[in-house]
Image (cartoon, grey):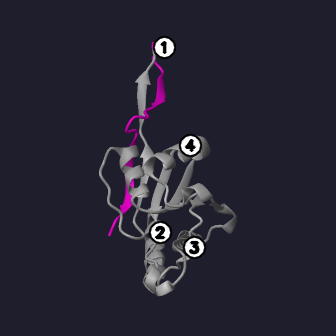
């Protein structure tokens, strides 16, 4: 894994207004606007994800669909993963280690507090995500010089990610 983007879904309709189960709550009109605005920031940074791992919550799926549409990517990049629904940072870490660690660049669209705590766990920084908040982290690579004089990259895993891009407002 070279890069990982960790996003909280956009603003959703409150449950008392939507009158549906939490998992079925749709994005609000503001949430749709948030997602479109965020996708423009991603375009400007030239961020392109290989895969979008998404919670099965309606608001997470809708967020990912809008992002993919606005970034002009293929919808085949979406993977809905049941275990991402309200996952804790440790459940996200387990998913990451078993499913996505070897990918070049992916995005996980999930829920707070798990998604912001997971970003904090990977980077060692404290994050508090608003709706449609996202942090893209890049894996730190240490270059060491071998006895033969050649430089060899070594991946660093403990607090081994640094912030590349953040949209937390």
Q: Position of residue 114 (x, y in %)?
A: 43, 55
- Cα–Cα gap, marks 3 and 1: 55 Å
Q: Which residues are magenta?
A: 147-169
Residue 76 in percent (x, y) is at: 70, 64
- Which quadrant is home to the N terminus? top right
Instruction: State how far apart marks 1 and 4 are (Cα).
Output: 30 Å
Q: Nearer the viewer, mark 2 or mark 3?
A: 3
The CA distance from mark 2 to mark 3 is: 10 Å
Residue at the image position 55 percent from the left and 54 percent from the top: 106
Q: Is 63 situated left or right of 121 in this image? A: right
Going by the picture, which residue comes out furthest to the left? Answer: 126
Q: How dense is the environment of label 1, judged by Cα within 10 Å: few (below 14), some, or many (20 and up)?
A: few
| Residue 111 place in picture, x, y as percent | 46, 63
User: Which residue does the numbered mark 4 point to in the structure image?
Assistant: 101
| Disc 3 from disc 4: Cα separation | 25 Å
Q: Which SS class for mark 3?
A: helix
Q: Which residue is mark 1?
A: 148
Mark 2 or 3 closer to N-term? 2
Q: Secondary structure at mark 1?
A: loop
Label whose residue precedes the other's in the sequence (3 or 1): 3
The residue lying toward the viewer, choosing from 17 and 6, is 17
Indicate whether residue 95 is drawn in magenta. no
Q: Residues within 10 Å of mark 4 (few under 14, many from 20)?
A: some
Tag 2 residue: 9
Outermost residue, top side: 147
Work out whether mark 3 precedes mark 4 in sequence or the reverse, and give the earlier one.
Answer: 3
The residue at 47%/75% (across/down) is 35
């Amino acid at each position: 894994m070279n890069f990982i983007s960790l996003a909280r879904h956009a603003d959703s309709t409150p449950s008392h207004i939507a009158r549906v189960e939490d998992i079925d709550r749709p994005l609000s009109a503001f949430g749709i606007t948030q997602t479109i605005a965020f996708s423009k920031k991603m375009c400007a940074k030239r961020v392109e994800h290989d895969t979008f791992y998404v919670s099965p919550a309606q608001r997470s799926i809708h967020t990912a669909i809008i992002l993919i549409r606005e970034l002009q990517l293929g919808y085949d990049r979406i993977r809905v993963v049941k275990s991402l629904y309200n996952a804790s940072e440790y459940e996200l870490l387990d998913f990451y280690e078993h499913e996505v660690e070897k990918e070049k660049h992916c995005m996980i669209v999930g829920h707070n507090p798990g998604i912001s705590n997971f970003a904090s766990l990977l980077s060692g920084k404290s994050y508090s995500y608003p709706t449609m908040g996202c942090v893209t982290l890049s894996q730190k690579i240490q270059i060491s010089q071998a006895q033969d004089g050649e430089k060899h990259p070594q991946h660093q895993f403990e607090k081994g990610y640094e912030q590349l891009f953040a949209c937390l407002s």
